[in-house]
Image (cartoon, rainbow, N blue to C red):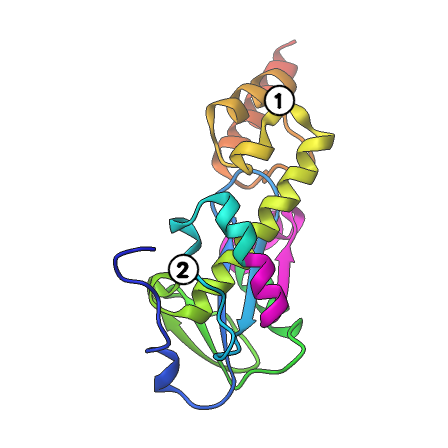
Amino acid sequence: MPATAPTFEIENTFSGIIAGIDEAGRGPWAGPVVAAAVILDRDNIPAGLADSKTLTEKRRETIAAEIHALAIVGVGSASVEEIDKVNILQATFLAMARAEAALAQAPDICIVDGSQKPKLNARTEMIVKGDAKSLSIAAASIIAKTTRDAMMRNLARAHPHYAWEKNKGYGAPAHRAGLDAHGVTEHHRKSFAPIRELLAQTQSCSDAA
């Protein structure tokens, strides 16, 4: 557990049904961006619930299963095509809206990690570093992270040269080596500078030939 664990202090400043929302996958070069919305049952909180970044992969998976069993969970994603079309920030907002819409119960308030506000149906409050402060946002961070990690492991089976099962699409050395040796796939974000530059270099070499 981190020195300062998330609590319900932020949730307690509001009334009504509260959903925490967070995302995973804004920075990677490949794969979708994923968001989760979670409405916790305060009488059934998974033990050890914390910001996903502070947990091991095994612990995240265990807690994610408990969250799915004990809470109301909605998950949304935006594809690589959508990321390239509208940019990563707007695609993240789209994933968050889809996560809210996927909840089986409509929230009165969404508390969202970060400072840039998505357009959601419910009243929306932004909480900077919310995944370290709010139990609801921490739960959403775990669901978003574990959901996206599973997606990237699945993509890695069809595209084994990029080590996505380990780097989850981030620009790690093994991913860079895979790009150099095998090129860009349909799962790469072509609007991201490293991929865009690699495509331009490939096109230049093709033109020169």
Q: Nearer the viewer, mark 1 or mark 2?
A: 2
Can you tell which quarter of the image residue 181 is in? top right
Q: Does the magenta stretch include residue 144?
A: no
Q: Residue 59 at what x, y percent from top left?
A: 49, 49
Determine which residue is flagged by label 2. 50
- Secondary structure beneath disc 1? helix
Q: Is residue 101 left or right of residue 136?
A: right
Which residue lies at the image location 63% right of the left edge and 57% below the top edge?
Answer: 77
The circle drawn on residue 113 is: none
Furthest residue toward top: 209
Q: Eyeballing the image, is 177 above or below 81?
A: above
State the residue in front, 144 or 175: 144
Residue 94 appearing in the image: no
Furthest residue toward right: 158
Name the residue type under label 2: Ala
Q: Earlier in the sequence, mark 1 or mark 2?
A: 2
Q: Residue 4 at what x, y percent from top left?
A: 27, 62
Determine which residue is flagged by label 1. 203
Q: How far apart are marks 1 and 2 (CA)?
A: 46 Å
- Magenta region: 64-90
What main secondary structure does the magenta stretch of the protein show?
helix
What quarter of the picture does the N terminus occupy? bottom left
Which residue lies at the image location 59% right of the left edge and 33% below the top edge?
Answer: 164
Q: Is residue 71 magenta?
A: yes
State the residue in front, 21 or 7: 7
Name the residue type under label 1: Gln
